[in-house]
Amino acid sequence: MTHLGDFEGAAHLRLAGGGEFDVVRALLAEWGDSAAGIGDDAAVVAVPAGQQLVVSTDTSLEGAHFRREWLNHFEIGYRSTAAALSDLAAMAAEPLGIFVALTLTDGDRADVTRLAAGIRDAVAPHGCPILGGDVTRGEKIALTITVMGAAERPLRRSGSQIGDRVYVTGLLGGPGAALAAWESGTVPSELHRARFAHPVARLAEARHLAAAGATAGIDISDGLVADIAHLAAANDLRFDIDLEHIPCIGDVSPLDAAASGEEYELVVTGSEKLRRDFYTNFGLELTDIGAVSDGAPEVALYHHGTRIAAPASFDHFRGE
Amino acid sequence: MTHLGDFEGAAHLRLAGGGEFDVVRALLAEWGDSAAGIGDDAAVVAVPAGQQLVVSTDTSLEGAHFRREWLNHFEIGYRSTAAALSDLAAMAAEPLGIFVALTLTDGDRADVTRLAAGIRDAVAPHGCPILGGDVTRGEKIALTITVMGAAERPLRRSGSQIGDRVYVTGLLGGPGAALAAWESGTVPSELHRARFAHPVARLAEARHLAAAGATAGIDISDGLVADIAHLAAANDLRFDIDLEHIPCIGDVSPLDAAASGEEYELVVTGSEKLRRDFYTNFGLELTDIGAVSDGAPEVALYHHGTRIAAPASFDHFRGE
């Protein structure tokens, strides 16, 4: 092994002490061909001609975004990476590569291979390489994943038209139910826990929807209603949402599903064309949950046609 | 304010609790026009036609890379950002923008404006915008800065030719002397402390050197000898270094200067042409410290023409 780019620097930090180099070796060994590009002080990334570069960065910190009791090392690596990739899905971009800034405790050394495997398994299905990163010794696990992608015409939060339908992918409520269970000291159902531990970035789905004419899009990291409020604000339009149409996982209620964050499903607006071939292609629901209408930017919730007041927990998301 | 891209997501993290949104507002207020591009789920970055995209990510973590007793919040923001930008200098790239993933404790809230000012002051002289990021609540300050730049032909670690001279920018030894003082419980001189707290990424200098024909380059984050060892490995060549020519700051010895890390000066190889107009343009020394020669990849140290054994502290840097 000759040079590892930024990873190499981490091996010799004066304050951080030794051992990081072993971690880098373990990471690269586990990543194999997924990290074949790592080399210099910085990575050189090719952006396809005629495409725009799309970039986002996301931190997953132990104690803030997950707890050790909830996820094993594989899942921590997987989930952090999939959550970051979801921002590329929100823009309908094709992944070009990721950068991994990893902070580990001394006690995590033995598990670094599992963590690396989780990161690799999150990028590999998307043909996305690991291009660089660094390793730091700390007191909590933290992963800051920077994702880079390319799109000819990135999907934006703005672009919705009056009369557009509002669609959401997948079944909502799993992560919220899992968190509620953990926070109340009980064990979440495997169905709910899997949705928290193993989110899937809807990258191919997003590109399909953008190509089919989606006018705007966002991923559900804050919760369905909260993220639709972002769309309402970005478009300066009202979004009417039918509570009874929200696709719920298991026995989760529509209101809980609408508040559940860290879903990493997509909300898009557009015409009915968007549903054509979607389920056939992806084996995933694309559900019509409402419409874009003329009006002050807000999320108006309806239950079988009757407008209902948004629960207090939704209030601070409105109209920002 | 309507939408803040990834920063917005951070405001509503279920586990992280409230308050992040206030932090984001404070950051954006302080950054002003430097962060004018922040918008969607991900940033859209334009790469100039015919140029290659260069990307690197670097974490600065309290306790690992700095201590609160050593740096104020402005300096923490400034230093973390300048250190990350230095990887673009090592590739002779022109900055396109940075992404800031910030972890702060509750106690840091009052100082976030100073931290933001430090980040801005590190990028502003280079005309480099802040394109996105996120905020997390944690128990230590951490900044993971992802830097993106463009270069027609990035400078690499490899490319050195037998007979090339080896040049270094600036005066070395300050950060090492400051760390040694802090670690021994004394107060570093202001000269040394400033070199640790206020590094300057040699971006314009690097582009000048690349245009003048530099064959390879690296920045000194691990220490002069350690980083030249990386060059030796990348080029599969021997690097002969004259200890007495190493440019030292103040009363630092050449051996201490050669071991001092986190310098963020540049080492480049090439012909004597590189020195032409350099001092005139930049008011910065470019010192000839040795030559590239045929031989197994290692750093050979000389003192007035006599080869000396490398100190034990350099040993593990050799030939990796």
Image (cartoon, coloured by chain):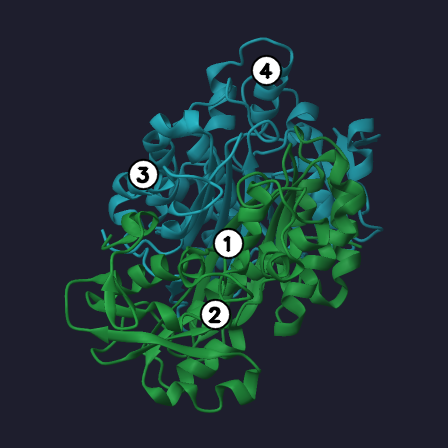
Chain colours: A cyan, B green
In front of the other: B218 or A121 = B218
Around disc 2, counting alpha carbons within 10 Å, would you say few (fewer than 14), some (14 to 19), or many (20 or more)? Answer: many
Residue A312 sits in which quadrant? top right
Q: Which mark is residue A22?
A: 3
Same chain check for tags 4 and 2? no
Q: Earlier in the sequence, mark 2 or mark 1?
A: 2
Please give the chain letter of the residue carrying mark 4: A
In front of the other: A94 or A257 = A94
Q: Which mark is residue B176?
A: 1
Q: Which mark is residue B32?
A: none
Say which residue appears at 33% left-offset and 50% top-offset. A127
Note whether B130 is above or below B181 in the view shown: below
Q: Amino acid at mark 1?
A: Gly
- Where's residue A67, x and y in %? 55, 23
Same chain check for tags 2 and 1? yes
Horizontal side of B9 relative to A236 (left or right) equals left
Report helix, strand or loop for mark 3.
helix
List the residue tagged with mark 2.
Answer: B89
Report helix, strand or loop for mark 4.
helix
Q: Are marks 1 and 4 in contact (CB under 8 Å)?
A: no
Note whether A84 is above or below B240 in the view shown: above
- Which tag is nearer the camera, tag 3 or tag 4? 3
Residue B131 sits in which quadrant? bottom right
- Real-space Cα distance between discs 3 and 4? 34 Å
Horizontal side of B131 relative to A119 (left or right) equals right
In front of the other: B225 or B76 = B225
- Real-space Cα distance between discs 2 and 1? 21 Å
Horizontal side of B122 relative to B218 (left or right) equals right
- Real-space Cα distance between discs 1 and 4? 47 Å
Report helix, strand or loop for mark 2.
helix
Around disc 3, counting alpha carbons within 10 Å, would you say few (fewer than 14), some (14 to 19), or many (20 or more)? Answer: few
List the residue tagged with mark 4.
Answer: A182
